[in-house]
Image: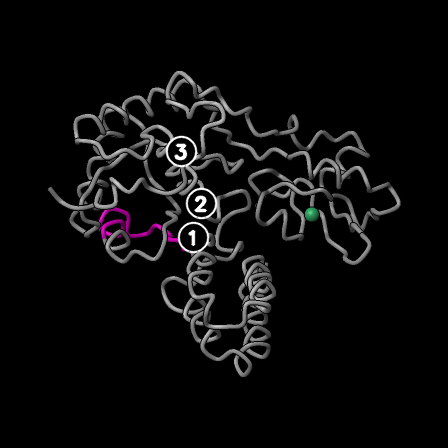
Amino acid sequence: MSDKCGQFHPVAFVVTSHETTEDFKIFYEALIDMCKTLKVKYKPVYIMQDACPASKEAILLFFPNVIILMCYFHVKKNVRDHKKLMPHENFDDLMRFLTKIHYSHNKDEFKKNINAFKKTYENVFPAMYEYCASWFEGVWSNWQIYHTKPGCANTNSNIESFNRSVKRFTDRKKMTMTSALKKIFKIIVYYSTEFSEFETKPKYNKKTKEVAALYTKSNFTEIRANKIRCTGKNSTYILILNDKNSDVLCSCTCKYFIKSAVCAHLLAYSNLNDLNLFGRAYSKPVKPVLEKFISRNKKGAKKKVGAPKKVTNCLERE
Ligand SMILES: [Zn+2]
């Protein structure tokens, strides 16, 4: 589960040998049961996943009205896996274009951006274009920032980094189910005791604070009460204060606000006028000390990369 600051909070773990609809059904059933027992209201509006039809089918059995979103991180990862479809030297530009598509403000802008993408790549790199275009329509095409309310996560990349941290706990060793479960309990204790609070409001980070400091009162013009024009170097945005449609009661037309529910323009205006629109500055929690939970490599020892040879068959059924 991710909070309004995009922080990841693990709430349940599942060990499965296959990723079939039946497996996901058992998982969601158990999760719903657990919430009932704990008297926690569990009615998701959005569920983020990668392109996994089995998971999608199971989700819709329990939550027919939920909006299933495609993870932007996985779209990029899949495109990166097809890197060979075009010359290496042009690949970074293409990735930047995909980022631009991700930041589309609305459906019209998304259409405009994918048309521009078509014009740029369809004839020069047809194979790569075809591959990327498969992510522009159909069930797995909703990975742009406008699909969610500002501040909601747009990727499940947090799960990927979590998977990486699990490998630190297990030291990439092949385990029996019992010892794997023991490790998982250790991970649960670690995340329950060492991690940060569930934030219900977005908070600005250091970068936003730095950019906001560059603005002065001359950048802002009041159009009418609560509606302010912010004129920057290359762009103009409209800020609305007391915006009842916004969870944070203010909004800005910039892409950063649409993604994170906080932006330098609103923060600058708030600071220059002592409005206190946002809470304290948000800085990522200091990485908790993992020592008591994991075994670490000895100082100077060569860092292990990838799975050790011995465990190459660790995903086999036994
Ligand atoms: Zn803004």
Badge 1 or badge 2: first in the primary sequence = 1
Residue 18 higher or lower than 102, as above or below: above
- Residue sticking out furthest to the left: 318
Residue ID for mark 1: 71
Residue 2 within the segment the image draws in magenta: no
Q: Quadrant of the C terminus?
A: top left
Q: Are marks 1 and 2 in contact (CB under 8 Å)?
A: yes
Q: Give the mark count.
A: 3
Mark 3 and mark 1: Cα distance apart in space: 20 Å
Give residue 157's mark: 2
Q: Nearer the viewer, residue 138 or 223?
A: 138
Q: Which circle marks residue 165 in the picture?
A: 3
**Amino acid type, mark 2:** Ser
Image quadrant in which you'd find residue 310: top left
Q: Which residues are magenta?
A: 58-70
**Residue flagged by tag 3: what amino acid is it?**
Ser
- Give the alpha-carbon distance from disc 1 to disc 2, as whole Å: 8 Å
Percent from the top left, x then y, of residue 298? 43, 23
Which quadrant holds residue 130? Answer: bottom left
- Does residue 79 sit above or below 188 in this rendering? below
Lower sequence index among marks 3 and 1 = 1
Type of amino acid under label 1:
Cys
* Residue 195 x/y as whole percent: 45, 23
Q: Provide the secondary structure element on which disc 2 rests.
A: helix
Residue 156: x and y, percent? 42, 45
Asked which secondary structure carries label 3, the reply is helix
Labels 1, 2: front one: 2
Distance between the alpha carbons at the discs numbered 3 and 2: 13 Å
In front: label 3 or label 1: 3
Q: Quadrant of residue 57?
A: bottom left
